Amino acid sequence: MECLAGDGPGWWLHLWRCAACGHIGCCDSSPARHATNHAREVRHPVSTSFEPGESWFWNVETETFLEGPQLLPPTSRPEAQPVPGPKDKVPLAFWD
């Protein structure tokens, strides 16, 4: 995952999973927007939430929500992982 590899600020608000290849990236509200960047670069336009309890699909080209199939596990980040995350990378100013 680019956020953890040092590509960008290193933290995210929410995670998305590419429905085509399984790539995990940060959402558009996160500083680096890795999920949308991946979708555009490799032409995999549909992503799904990688957050516990969420099951929506999003097409970045048409900017529409879609119905999608049940994907193979894992289907979310661990529930014990804080959001935003990882906690030690989120700027203190964000919590104020």
Image (cartoon, rainbow, N blue to C red):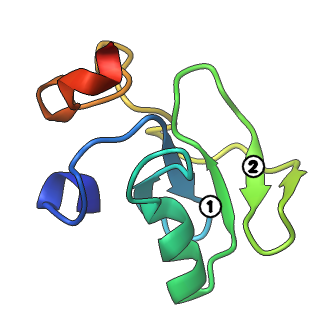
- Within 10 Å of disc 2 (Cα), the crowding (few <14, some 14-19, many 20+) is many
Q: Is residue 50 above or below residue 17?
A: above
Q: Is residue 61 visible?
A: yes
**Which residue occupies 30% across, 13% down?**
80
Residue pointed to by mark 2: 57
**Which residue occupies 60% across, 70% down?**
20
Q: Is residue 82 visible?
A: no
User: Residue 2: x, y in percent?
Assistant: 26, 62
The amino acid type found where label 1 is placed reads Ala
**Image depth: mark 2 or mark 1 in front:** 2
Q: Is residue 32 above or below residue 73?
A: below
User: Residue 59: x, y in percent?
Assistant: 77, 64
Q: In this view of the protein, which residue sits in the foreground, 13 or 56?
A: 13
Q: Earlier in the sequence, mark 2 or mark 1?
A: 1
User: Residue 65: x, y in percent?
Assistant: 86, 50
**Which residue occupies 52% across, 39% down?**
50
Q: Is residue 46 above or below residue 85?
A: below
Question: Which quadrant of the rendered structure holds the N terminus?
Answer: bottom left
> Which numbered disc covers residue 3?
none
Q: Confirm or deny contact between disc 2 and disc 1 (CB under 8 A).
A: yes
Question: Which quadrant of the rendered structure holds the C terminus?
Answer: top left
Q: Residue furthest bottom?
A: 42
**Helix, strand or loop for disc 1:** loop
- Within 10 Å of disc 1 (Cα), the crowding (few <14, some 14-19, many 20+) is many
The amino acid type found where label 2 is placed reads Phe
Residue pointed to by mark 1: 19
How far apart, in angstroms, are the residues tagged by discs 2 and 1? Answer: 8 Å
**Helix, strand or loop for disc 2:** strand
| 92 relative to 22 in the view: left or right | left
**Which residue occupies 38% across, 22% down?**
83
| 63 relative to 16 in the view: left or right | right
Q: In this view of the protein, which residue sits in the foreground, 93 or 12?
A: 93
